Image (cartoon, rainbow, N blue to C red):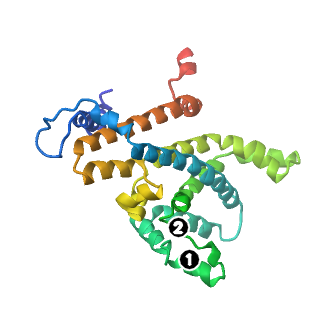
Amino acid sequence: MILAGPAILMFLAFVILPVFMAAYYGFFKWKGFGVPTNFVGFQNYITIFTDQNFLDALTHNGMIVVMSLIMQGPAAIAFALLLNQNIKGRSLIRVLIFVPYVISEVIVGTGWSLMLQYQGALNDLLTNLGMGWATADWIANPNTAIWTLMVIISWKYLGFAVILMLAGMQGIPDELYEAAAIDGASYWRIQRWITLPLLGPTVRVWAFLSIIGSLQLFDLVYIIWGQYVSSTAGTSTMATYMVREGRLAGNYGYGNAVAVAIFVISLVIALTYQRFVLRRDTEGALTDGPERKAR
């Protein structure tokens, strides 16, 4: 307990205290300087959940969470299965897949926003290939913008998922594969009955990280769509809403209330996922679990 003291103090000072301070300022109409005096009670918190713009942003975050799991999960497992084989150029492919993850969000957002302009490189390429019918306003059209965002997110973060899956696969004992091969099991049956079940803990941890990252999404949307276009294009998130209605509007009390709302939503989702999904994995990892106590 004594050795954990400094870590606990740091956690309280830099995580818990800011949350309580934000909750406190959320009870005021405050311009960001001086002592807040205009107490408004729960009005800021009530306004959040009656503002259609926030509800739209919450919906967009929910779509991003679901679509990230659907688009990135199967693709990451497929790439990991491929890269887990002794194929030529495997190391180069691993690097190429992982490179987008280490590139700054500013560079990624700026590059994609230039390519996806209506007069940008993608539409020019489609026109030159005789596919002018496929050109679109990829960023501003509300019907395509959210899918444009999903493609960019998948391109950016797929490499991280692949590396996690690959690490999980390489932790599976070779003896299991050798025994299955001796019994005459095909490649796909081995993957179905050995690889995928034993990859479960890795998939669940990746899904947790993906969900939390999707709820926190801010930088790519802010860079590509800006603080105002994102809401009309249908790509706004809770974080971009907080910055637009809080800092940019000079209403820091309301911005703090939005921050607390995002914290509570993320906390509830994280605790629910921990309780019903991750619990069976972490129970086996704890050294003082029920079985140990029984001994």
Image vertical order of residue 220 relative to residue 290, above or below: below
Disc 2 crowd, CA 10 A, few/some/many (<14, 14-19, 20+): many
Residue 156 is at least partly visible in this image: no
Q: Which x, y percent locates residue 111?
A: 45, 72
Q: Are marks 1 and 2 in contact (CB under 8 Å)?
A: yes
Q: Residue at x 63, y 55 (%)?
A: 76
Q: Which x, y percent locates residue 255?
A: 28, 44
Q: In terms of sequence position, does the residue under pointer 1 or pointer 2 come before the other?
A: 1
For label 1, the residue is 123
Residue 186's tag is: none
Q: Residue at x 20, y 36 (%)?
A: 28
Outermost residue to the top: 294
Distance CA(mark 1)–CA(mark 2): 9 Å
* Amino acid, disc 2: Trp
Residue 82 is at least partly visible in this image: yes
* Amino acid, disc 1: Asn
Outermost residue to the right: 184
For label 2, the residue is 138
Q: Which x, y percent locates residue 247?
A: 26, 51
Identify the image quadrant of residue 88: bottom right
Q: Residue at x 48, y 55 (%)?
A: 234
